[in-house]
């Protein structure tokens, strides 16, 4: 990737990269550390441009007007500035600095010298947090506007949406609420579902979705082509390619994409039902 520095009225240097990535504000005092980080960031596919900022107030001002940027600052500047919680990634050299940064609620810590893989992982986590925060604000704003438009309370709005969700379920649709949005999925696109603590992971052909729901409630929403094969797993029969029976009362279901799921003895299906996949 070729990096071209261009002049900017608000920042000292901007390194241009593909437009689908994110902008990074870099507030680092040491020239050697700044140049090393700028080079590593410009090599990251997640970064659109790197803006080197020489003033803490300017950095905070840009943060306040654009929540879609990632801010990285050195430990020295982090100590001297009242950053908003979970808004900045801190660069430092020691574990003591990392502990101090996390106790002050930094969004993450980047050890120097910088590993590109670890830097990309840290940037990816921060990007997911930014996206979730943006989606949550959109969701809250839509709920507030719908409540005002309908002249009903938020609780009444949620009850109305739940009634609509039930109607969707009767038309082969699956209506689910994730952490910050509503999902309307075709049941035929769901391959299998497994429990993960208080959440469920809905595995579709194109993506996976994490939703807050019990497996029993989920099973009530699904059509007859879905069967439960363990305490924590539901599978779509249409997604099953074959079954394997390596031993008596031991059955594995192989899905069309190669996923291998074990059927627990408690939920072992009828032999006649199993024969179609053996």
Image: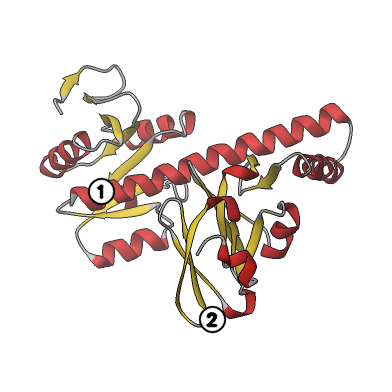
The x and y percentages for residue 151 are 89, 31
The x and y percentages for residue 211 are 61, 53
Residue 249 falls left or right of residue 6: right
Q: Residue at x 69, y 45 (%)?
A: 174
Q: Residue at x 43, y 34 (%)?
A: 63
The picture quadrant where one finds residue 149 is top right
Q: Residues within 10 Å of mark 1 (few under 14, many from 20)?
A: some
Residue 257 falls left or right of residue 118: right
Give the number of the disc on residue 249: 2
Give the number of the disc on residue 119: 1
Q: Residue at x 62, y 34 (%)?
A: 138
Q: Residue at x 61, y 43 (%)?
A: 188
Whichever of labels 1 and 2 marks the residue nearer the N terminus, that label is 1
Viewer-closest of 204 and 198:
204
Q: How is the image coloured?
A: secondary structure
* Residue 8 drawn above or below residue 215: above
Q: CA distance from mark 1 to mark 2?
A: 48 Å
Secondary element at tag 2? loop
Residue 195 visible from this viewpoint: no
Residue 112 visible from this viewpoint: yes
The picture quadrant where one finds residue 42 is top left
The x and y percentages for residue 58 are 36, 30
Residue extending farthest to the bottom is 248
Secondary element at tag 1? helix
Labels 1 and 2 touching (C-beta < 8 A) = no
Give the number of the disc on residue 233: none
The x and y percentages for residue 135 are 57, 38
Q: Residues within 10 Å of mark 2 (few under 14, many from 20)?
A: few
């Amino acid at each position: 990737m070729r990096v071209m520095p261009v002049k900017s009225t608000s920042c000292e240097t901007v390194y241009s990269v593909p437009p689908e990535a994110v902008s990074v504000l870099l507030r680092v005092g040491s020239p050697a550390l700044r140049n090393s980080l700028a080079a590593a960031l410009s090599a990251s596919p997640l970064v659109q441009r790197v803006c080197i900022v020489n003033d803490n107030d300017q950095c905070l001002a840009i943060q306040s007007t654009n929540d879609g940027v990632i801010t990285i600052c050195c430990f020295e500047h982090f100590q001297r500035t009242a950053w908003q919680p979970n808004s900045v990634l801190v660069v430092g050299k020691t574990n003591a600095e990392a502990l101090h940064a996390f106790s002050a609620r930094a969004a993450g810590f980047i050890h120097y010298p910088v590993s590109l893989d670890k830097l990309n992982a840290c940037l990816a986590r921060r990007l997911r947090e930014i996206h979730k925060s943006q989606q949550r604000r959109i969701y809250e704003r839509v709920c507030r506007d719908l409540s005002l438009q309908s002249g009903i309370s938020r609780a009444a709005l949620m009850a109305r949406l739940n009634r609509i969700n039930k109607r969707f379920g009767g038309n082969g649709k699956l209506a689910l609420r994730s952490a910050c949005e509503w999902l309307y999925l075709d049941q035929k696109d769901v391959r299998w579902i497994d429990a993960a603590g208080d959440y469920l992971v809905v595995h579709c052909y194109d993506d996976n979705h994490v939703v807050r729901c019990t497996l029993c409630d989920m099973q009530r929403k699904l059509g007859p082509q879905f069967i439960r094969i363990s305490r924590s797993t539901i599978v779509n029969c249409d997604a099953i390619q074959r079954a394997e029976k390596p031993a008596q009362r031991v059955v594995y279901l192989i899905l069309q994409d190669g996923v291998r799921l074990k059927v627990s003895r408690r939920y072992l299906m009828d032999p006649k039902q199993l024969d179609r996949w053996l």
